[in-house]
Image (cartoon, rainbow, N blue to C red):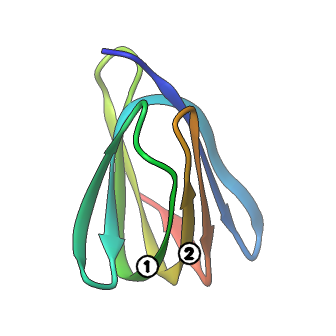
Amino acid sequence: MKAFVLRLVGPEGVLADAEVESLVLPGAAGSLGVQAGHESWTVLLKRGAVSWKKAGGAWDSAEIGGGVASIEGTRTIVLADSAKTS
């Protein structure tokens, strides 16, 4: 599967900066799945888990207190109001 860059930023700084194959976001209107090549989109996030599958297969996650995500074909940037890695 093709990978893309995820950058997760909270008030304390960068919590994740990784090549990922898949990403699940807690969108304000419901859960949102992202893969490489996704159409560009900016989405409001609610409190919940951000989960990502790293290149190579392992899953990782972080809890966020809401925020916004900028999704592009080769990268996604998540700006979280608060965040804590699992």
Question: Which of marks 1 and 2 precedes in the sequence?
Answer: 1
Mark 2 and 1 residues: CB-CB less than 8 Å, in contact?
A: yes
- Residue type at mark 2 is Val
Residue in view at x 52 percent, y 36 percent: 73
Q: How many marks?
A: 2
Badge number at residue 85: none
Q: Which of 71/23 is in front?
A: 71
Q: Residues within 10 Å of mark 1 (few under 14, many from 20)?
A: many
- Measured Cα–Cα span from mark 2 to mark 1: 5 Å
What percent of the width, then of the height, locates residue 83? 56, 73
Which quadrant would residue 3 be assigned to in this image?
A: top left
From the image, tell me which residue sits under label 2: 68
Classify mark 2: helix, strand or loop: strand
**What kind of residue is marked 1?**
Leu
Residue 45, label in figure = 1
Is 52 on the left-hand or right-hand side of 31?
A: right
Residue at x 40% of width, y 41% of height: 38
